Amino acid sequence: MAPYWAEDLALTAKAMGEESRARMLLALLDGRAWTAAELADCAGITRGTATTHLNHLADAGLLEEVRQGRHRYVRLKNTDVADAIEAMVRLSPRSRPLMPRSFQGHKHGQELKQGRTCYRHLAGALGVAVTRQWRDQGIIGADWTLTGAGRLWADSAGLQLPEKPGRALARPCLDWTERVDHAAGLFPELFVQVALERRWLERGAHPRAIRLTAKGAEELQRIGLVVPLGSNPTLS
């Protein structure tokens, strides 16, 4: 007899197993709240159809609704949902969820490979390069814990780490384009938040694309991270 949770697993997989919903879920991996109209444009469907799909995803426990005045936004429910989506992408036989169908599609694909948000932390070649620097310098230990040196570095970067975090400060997350681990967890999420606020990082043409600015390269070097600007970071 199948385990009692088999029905729940099938429900979740079915909710993800429709291309328009998959496109919306991938867009929501940028960690922000989106409107139905924005997600409809992203998926190439009507707003009414998008609303139906979003209701289905919310009923399956994958999304949460945020209301501000008359406006309704949706976002991924939590990091578990983001991790599940990334895991499904890695299991994909092609592992190319954004196959270029046009020049713009090709441009977006290149941007996402170079640097992107994986929910709220940094991924792609840029994310892997930053993670390598953190590990080489002992900021993140061999067991993927944030070290004492890491806390000092976080202070120098202006990250406000909680005294008693409710989840892991750092953990490995397998990058679906680079095929090696980048750093996930509260520490990398705070880094992205601060880096965007200070314009060390900026968003590209695709909503999830992230690139390093000239200011960012200089500021990171000042606090001990050498990430080349305008080159493939994985080759540094």
Image (cartoon, grey):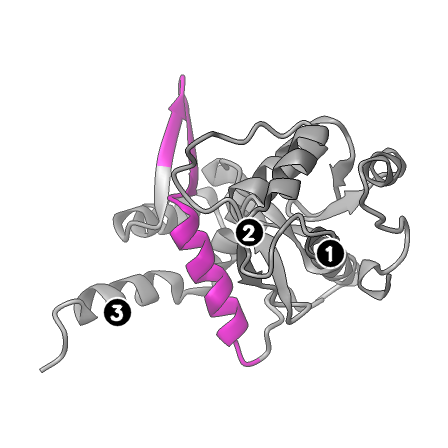
Q: Quadrant of the C terminus?
A: bottom right
Secondary structure under badge 1?
Answer: helix
Q: Residues within 10 Å of mark 3 (few under 14, many from 20)?
A: few
Give the mark nearer the N terminus: 3 vs 2. 3
Residue 29, percent from left and from top = 53, 49
Mark 2 belongs to which amino acid? Answer: Ala
Q: Determine whether, in the image, residue 161 is placed left or right of residue 96.
A: left
In the image, the segment drawn in magenta is: 65-93
Mark 1 belongs to which amino acid? Answer: His
Which residue has dot 3 on it?
10
Above or below 161: residue 235: below
The extreme left residue here reads: 1
Q: Which mark is residue 184?
A: 2
Residue 171, percent from left and from top = 52, 55
Q: Determine whether, in the image, residue 199 is placed left or right of residue 11.
A: right
Q: Residues within 10 Å of mark 2 (few under 14, many from 20)?
A: many
Identify which residue is drawn at 48% across, 30% down. 162
Q: Quadrant of the N terminus?
A: bottom left
The extreme top residue here reads: 69
Secondary structure under badge 2?
Answer: strand
